[in-house]
Each structure stands twice: as structure tokens, then as C-alpha cells.
Amino acid sequence: MLAIGGLRQRSTIRVWRDAAVGLRQSPVAMVFGLVAASWAGLILLAAGPADVAVPGPFDAGALLARTLTVGAMMLLIALPAAEHVSRESLRRRRRAAVSLFLVAFVAVWVGCLTVVEVALDGLLPSSPIAQTAAIAITCVAAAIWQMSPQRAMLSSRCARASILPPTGSRAAVGDLRFGFRSGLGCFGSCWAVMLVMALMPGSHLVIAAILTGALTADRLVIRVRRRPGVIAVGLVGLGIATLASASSPTTTGFIAWICSIPGR
Amino acid sequence: MVYVRQDIWALEQQQPWHPITMAYAQAVGALQQRSIANAGDPTGWTYQAAIHGTPTTPAQPGWNQCQHGGWFFLPWHRMYVYRIEAILRVEVLKNGGPHDWALPYWNYDSGGSTNYLPLPFREEALPDGSPNPLYVLQRASGYNAGTRALPRPAVTSPANALAMPTFTPPLFPGFGGGQSTFQHFWNATGGLEQTPHNDVHVQLGGATGWMGNPDFAALDPIFWLHHANIDRLWTVWRAKSANVNPTQNAWLQQQFDLFDTSGAPARTQVKDVLDTVVQLDYRYDDQVPLPPAKLAERGGGDAMAEGVQPAPEMIGASTEQISLSGKPHSVAVAIEQGAHTESLAPEAASPRRLFLSVEHLDADSTPGVVYGVYVEAPGHEPLHVGNVSLFGIHKIRASRAPGGDVHDQRLTYDVTDAVRAFGIDGLAGSSLTVTFAPIEGDAPEAAAEAVSAPPIRIGRVSLFTA
């Protein structure tokens, strides 16, 4: 009995040790660390001097802010894919594989957001009333997109694995390719929500946090058929709140407070 | 009254066109006529078949509901067969058939000529000369002619599946399939679902026949006898005292909507179909009494059963994508030099198991070919570890992941015993050869069909310890 008990105890220790090794090998810590660092970076940027000139879309500062925004808002969504890359890679190159995947994923998002910002620079109306209307209309459009079968298809494509060769340069290319495809699929699925954020005047850490929560819940937490509807209702609510802000001093104050928190 | 489902070949050996078989044929004919009269009648033949799958649009209530590639495969099909059996029984009694009529099953693995399509399904006419409702043209060549049999044991044997100790292990699909949500087709195919279920579908249907396509399969009357056999094999597995069904509420409380004998919607939960005798009033002629329900208790140092699961670890993978076009194809899987393969030994403190994963499976359309999967180490004979067949590939391609799960279509095989037979020493740093070879049986037409079938693409073959 003693021997059996000893064996079982050793076995349990081994299992927990395996679990600890598994956690160290898992990309969860890496992704959460990057997300935390990105939020810290955004907050630091927000705390910087407010009276500097607005940077152009290709300035280093703007690219840094965009990279931090993607890191803060989108990396949690990429976590299942990063775990997939880790699980499907040899132990000795797991960290490298996940890093390559994340670099490609973030690069796609930063590139797409840059294009969006350049386009918005030329299209955005200048009057505050027109801007409010544009935000409200975009919220409704994003809600409609959220419910569309095209978005569901792109969301599904975002979660479709691609082949990961095990070793050598082909492995690196495979990790980058998967990151690129995954990032592109996620952008195709989430662009409308991100557009809402891009249209918000000034900076918007609180709105970024709310949207991050919604997008993360959409992809990772809420597993019911109605989940696109929940997000869509939230977007419509945001649109109504934005419109109301134009007429109600209280709401205006609230929205102004949210938008006055600098963030990018 | 507890109805007894009997083996079709045993019935036919007692008497050609046994009354139970004849009653089935007449009842099928009646349901087919019902569908011709009113295609919207849920108790009609085509409506019932569409519940499994149909390309017809717009879909009617209850269509395209079959559950494949996950842990609802067995309970959903049990409900489905049970419901149509009740509908058929009403017709049997109306026609003056046996009062204790139950759907027969087809055990194609019981020796002799049982792997041939049963005779009543091959004859174009009933004994009275009228058209035989059990006969359909849309089958792979040779089966209706009686010149072709299901390859035995490679396709017909449930031995690998029945040897699996767990219905749904935490990491890999197991006997009954991996955890899934309500999914028409998903990628966690269980051992029994793959072989013999998927393989028999693909063999009988070929590339264009009904049985090979889930959108038409249930139109072929042999479908129901095939599924009765799969259901029987679940009772065989469950009868082993150590084997238990899942105990998670996500499985037990999942509900499915079918139709009762009047055509009214009937909702059933998985927990209501676990004991065929007590809950559903039927049993199989070889069914032994169900042991008391047990909670999963494994022990024996099996890490798979411990509370904390070690993460699966990939220890090797192929480097080339391959395409199967009716001929044998081998691929080398190099095992990492530093892989901890010593933990695969049964005497290891916490023995791990080795899984072969055939990943990124795809084809442009249903290839009506079953490929055997063989693992070989230098100096050893290749060992058959399972089969690849892509039943419903068009449905699989359209499947969507719940939540953000990253997925591809893959089949996983436990190759621990095969590798232990080769010897664990020196495994790290060596390589295994994995060969895919079409299973053709003795039929002369099978080889030609295999070559002309749409190729199966495989993205990667990998080895995992867990």
C-alpha cells in the first residue's frame, strides 16, 4: 500500500510539474504580458504633453500608437491562434513560432489601420455635428455588419488553421503566413467596430477598453448563437448615446469626458 | 414491451425475405409514397432523410440536423433511428406485419458473407414482382450485383474503437468523439464514427452514390440498418464495466428536435436515450444487461485520467504536403532528437500515450475511397492503426468554429501500442514511416475507382505525446 501510495504521489507531482512546464511553454503568459505592456504604453502616451502637433499617419509616433492600440485591443483575440501555433510546434521553437505569428498578426492590423486613417483624414467632416452624425451612422453600419453572414464567414476564416511545417525556414514562413492570414481574417471580421473607434474625436482609452471587452467576449467568452446580436445592440446603443450627446448636456459631458481621456 | 432488433443476415438465413425484412420493405414503400403525396409530411421518407441532410432549399423545420465529428454523433443518431423506427412500426402494424417488429441491423463484421449487402437490398423486385423499395441504384459498383463486399476487417471491424477506454478523453476524440457544441459537422471524429461508420458510408456510396453523401445517405434504406449496427456497437462498448458515457451536463442536457409518429415535433435530451431497454423499449439480440452507471475511475497511473492534464506535445511532423490518388503513399515523420519518448513506456512513472494526427484533410468532393493508415519503424512490419475517409467533406468545409477555436479537419489515432511493439528505445531522433494505402478488398472495380476518385489532400502528419 505504501509503495502504491508513493507511486501515486510521485505521479501526482509529475503531473503538476508537467502542468507547470506546460504553462511556461504556453503563449498565454507572453500574450498577456504584451497586452499589459501595450496598455501601459497607451496610458504613458496619453499622459504625455497634450499640446504637441497631431502626427501624420506615417510618423513614428503614430505608428507606435497604432501598434500599441493593436497590441492592447487585438492580441487577446489572437490568443487561441497563438496557442494553436504553440501546440503545433516543436518544443525548441515554440517561443520563436509564437513570436513570428504575433509579429505578422500585428503587422497586418497596423497596416490596415494606417490605410483606414489615411482614408479618414480625407473623408472626415470638420463640423462637430457632422462628426457626431458620422459616428452614429457608423455605429449602426457596424451593428448591421456584425449580424451579416459575410462577417460570420470572415470570422470563421479567422479561426481556420493553416499548415505549420515543423522545422527550418519553411517553419518560419508558415508561422508568418498563419499570422498574416489570421490577422487579415480578424481585420475583415472586426473592421467595422475598429472604425467606430477610429472616428471617435480625440483620444479614447475608455472606449478602447469597452470595445476590447466586447470583441474579446465576442470571440472567446460568449459562446451562444446570439452573441453577434449582443455586440450589435451595444453598437446601436453607442450610436444613440453619441447622438444624445449632441443634445443633452449630461450625456455631452459624459461623452466628452470619455473622449477627453487621451489615448493615441 | 421491449422490442428486439435482430441481425438482418441471421433473419435472412432463417428465411429469405423474412417477415421482418418484408415488413420493413413495405413500410419503407409506404413512407416513400407518403412523401410523393405530400413532401412536407415530416413522417414521409424524403422528409425524414432530409433531417439527416439535404441540399434542398429552403430548408424545412428539422432539416440538416445530423451531428457528426463530435460527442453528439452517437446519441443524435440513436434518437434519429428510434424515431423513424416508431414511424415505420405504425406502417408495419397497419399492413398486418409482426406485432413485435423492430428495425433489423446489419452486422457486416460477423463472418461468412455478412460483409456483402444483404440480399433483399440487392433485388430489384419483391417476391410478388412489384418494385422493391429497398433497392436503390445509387450505390458504388458491385454492391448491388453481389460481386463486391465491404473489406473485412479493415473497414468493417469496430475492434479499434471498442478497445478505446474513454468516450471523450480530454485531449483527443476517443470512442465517442471530442467535445463539441451543436455542430452539423465538426472535426473531432470519434473512433466508432470513423471506423466502421464513415468507412462503410464511403465504401457503399462511392464517389457519387447516396450512402457516401450525408445529404442523401438516409434515402438509401440500408442507411438505417447500418446505423442500427453503430448504435448496437455503442451498447457493446457500454456493456464493458469500465466504460462510461460522458457525465458532463453539456452532453447530458443537450436537446434535439425530431418528430413523433404523428409528425408532431418531439424534443429529447441526450440523458433520455442512454439506456435503450429502460428508456426506449428496445434492445439488440446480443445485448447484455447494462452495468450500473459508474463515474469515470481509471487509476493505474494513467496521466490521461488525472485531474490536471499534461499539455500535448508535438514531437515530430512531416515536412511535405501529400495528395492521395488511389495509390499507396508514404511519408516520413522525423521524431525530434530531444523528445521525451521514454515516457511512452508502460512502466514510466506517468506513462504518456502517442497519437498520430493526420491534419488539414481536404478534397474537392467526396472521394469514395477508404485509405488504411499504416505505421512502420525501420526493421519492423507496418501496422494498421486506422483509416482515412472523408464522409461529408463538403459539409466539413462549411463548418464554423464555436468561439475563437482554431481548427482544421484532422483525424487522430492512438499509436501507442504500435510504437511500443516497435520498441521505445532509440525512438527519439529516429523516424516513423506513415503509409496511406487504398483499401480495395477483392473487387476488381475498386482499384480503378480509387484512381479516378478526387484526391485527398493531407497538409501534415504529426506525432504528439499526451
Image (tube, rainbow, N blue to C red):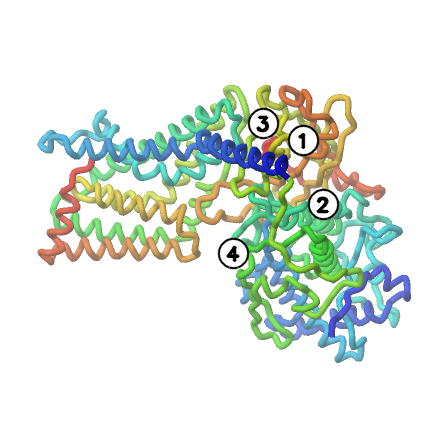
Residue at mark 3: B315
For label 4, the crowd category at 10 Å Cα-Cα, with few meaning under 14, some 14 to 19 and many 20 or more, is few
Say yes or no: labels 4 and 1 on the same chain: yes
In this view, which residue lies farthest toward the front? A2
Where is residue A199 drawn, in percent x and y? 22, 44
Q: Residue at x 38, y 40 (%)?
A: A77
Numbered label attached to residue B347: 1
Q: Which quarter of the rendering shows the N terminus of chain B?
A: bottom right
In the image shown, does B391 or B386 lie closer to the viewer? B386
**Mark 1 is on which residue type?**
Glu
* Earlier sequence position, callout 2 versus callout 1: 2
In the image shown, does B424 or A119 lie closer to the viewer? B424
Numbered label attached to residue B163: 2
For label 3, the crowd category at 10 Å Cα-Cα, with few meaning under 14, some 14 to 19 and many 20 or more, is many
Q: Residue at x 14, y 30 (%)?
A: A48
Residue at mark 4: B250
**Label 2: chain letter:** B
**Mark 2 is on which residue type?**
Ala
In the depicted structure, whether residue B118 falls above or below residue A13: below
